[in-house]
Amino acid sequence: MQFQLFSGFVLFAVLACAFAFPLQAPEDQEEEQFALKPPASRLKREAAEWSGAGGANGKSQGGYAGFVNPNGSKGSVGYGHANGQGHTVSVDGRVPVWSNKNRYGESTLNVGGGATQHFGGPAGNRNLDRRVGVDFNHRF
């Protein structure tokens, strides 16, 4: 009974607030006008490179798809299956979080992660394999 009374009071308060505040019509507001102007010169961004592999024979099948962006980020998805051994699914990715170029060379800091899961087979389902890593790279 108390819950119903409380919920009724909350509903009444919300409706009272909703109807108490005046609504501004769109024609009452002044808006600034902007014009879109194309840039004088447009640099074309490099496209991501896609890669893939796959195949099948009498005993195993599988595939892989991945991409690498010009900024250094990359990702991949994979699948594998062998007769009587089960299925394996994997996902991986990497993102550059910091880079610095100076007279001593170029440094980058990347963060990556991934996961792999195996289903079925003689050993049954296995626990999810999770990976997280940080790598620092310096090129002279």
Image (tube, rainbow, N blue to C red):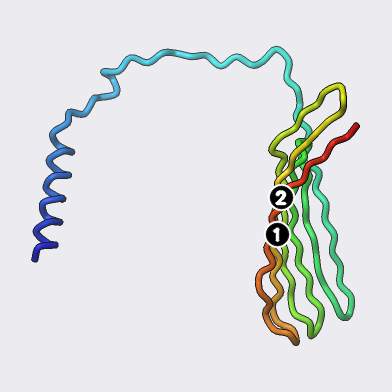
Q: Is residue 95 left or right of residue 11?
A: right
Q: Which residue is mark 2?
A: 112
Give 136 or 92, whichever is nearer the viewer: 136
Image coordinates of residue 113 in percent, x first then y, are: 69, 54
Q: Amino acid at mark 2?
A: Gly
116 vs 110, nearest the viewer: 110
| Residue 98 in the image, given as x and y percentages of width and height | 71, 34
- Classify the position of the C terminus by image quarter: top right
Residue at image mark 1:
131
Tell me, yes or no, if residue 129 can be seen here. yes
- Picture mark count: 2
**Quarter containing the N terminus:** bottom left
Residue at position x 70%, y 59% in the image: 131
Which of the 4 image quarters holds residue 77?
A: bottom right
CA–CA distance in space, label 2 to label 1: 8 Å
Labels 2 & 1 near each other (Cβ < 8 A): yes
Up the image or down, 14 lies above or below 79; here it is above
Identified at 75% across, 87% down, the residue is 122
- The image position of residue 21, as x and y in percent, is 17, 31
Q: Is residue 52 above or below residue 49?
A: below
Q: Residue at the location (69% across, 67% down)?
A: 129
Point 77% across, 48% down: residue: 67
Against 133, residue 22 (above or below) is above
SS of the residue under disc 2 = strand
Residue 33: mark in rendering: none
